[in-house]
Image: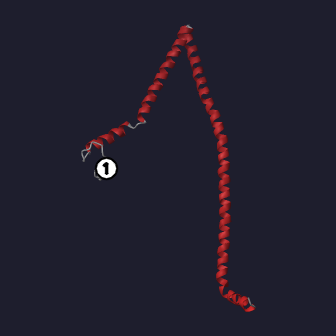
Amino acid sequence: MGPTEVDAPVAEAPAAQPASAVDGDADASLVDLARNSTRFVRAWGSLVASEAALARVNLGRLLLLALFIPAIAIGIVLGLDGVLAGLLYRLVSDWALALGAVVLVNAGLLVGVLVLLRRWWRTLSLPRSREALTGFWRDHDDNGTRGKNADTHRPN
């Protein structure tokens, strides 16, 4: 390569200088965007990791305290049963009768709770909505299939 070949591209460089300056700014902004995106992803990952660690600790605490709820409920029921038995003993002066009455009250409350739970369980299946949809289907069975083929636009 001679000295003229090396000088020739240098002579053309000033004409291309503004385009390369714009590209340099674009490259710098892309580099900044990449750096900021990387920082954002790292910060997001750190946030998710720290929240997951906090959730893991709190889940353990919640489970531990959830075990105490039945114990507290049993304690409350036993305390109320004791108060009721004491009051009944003062009225009838017989412990067997007082404790029997408390057992009957508890059994009645248990049956009442089970009846309520059964009633609420039945509503979970949405019986009125199912009945309405079945009635709607029966009333508007234009193709005479009685629900066997729900697609009325496609031939069988």
How crowded pointer 1 is (Cα within 10 Å; few <14, some 14-19, many 20+) is rated as few
Identify the residue at horizontal 61%, vertical 23% (top origin): 75
**Closer to the camera, 22 or 82?**
22
Q: Residue furthest top?
A: 94
**Closer to the camera, 68 or 1?**
1
Q: Residue furthest bottom?
A: 4
Identify the residue at horizontal 46%, vertical 24% (top origin): 112
**Closer to the camera, 113 or 131?**
131
Q: Is residue 5 above or below residue 38?
A: below
SS at mark 1 in the image: loop
Identify the residue at horizontal 62%, vertical 30% (top origin): 67
Is residue 155 left or right of 114 when viewed as pictured?
A: left
Is residue 140 left or right of 40 when viewed as pictured?
A: left
Q: Position of residue 46 (x, y in %)?
A: 68, 53
Kind of residue indicated by mark 1: Asp
Q: Which residue is mark 1?
A: 151
Q: Is residue 119 above or below residue 140?
A: above
Q: Quadrant of residue 28?
A: bottom right
Q: Quadrant of the N terminus?
A: bottom right
Q: Residue furthest right?
A: 3
Q: Position of residue 26 (x, y in %)?
A: 64, 74
Q: Position of residue 97 (x, y in %)?
A: 53, 9
Q: Position of residue 154 (x, y in %)?
A: 30, 53
Identify the residue at horizontal 33%, vertical 42% (top origin): 133
Numbered circles on residues, count: 1
Q: Quadrant of residue 71?
A: top right
Q: How is the image coloured?
A: secondary structure
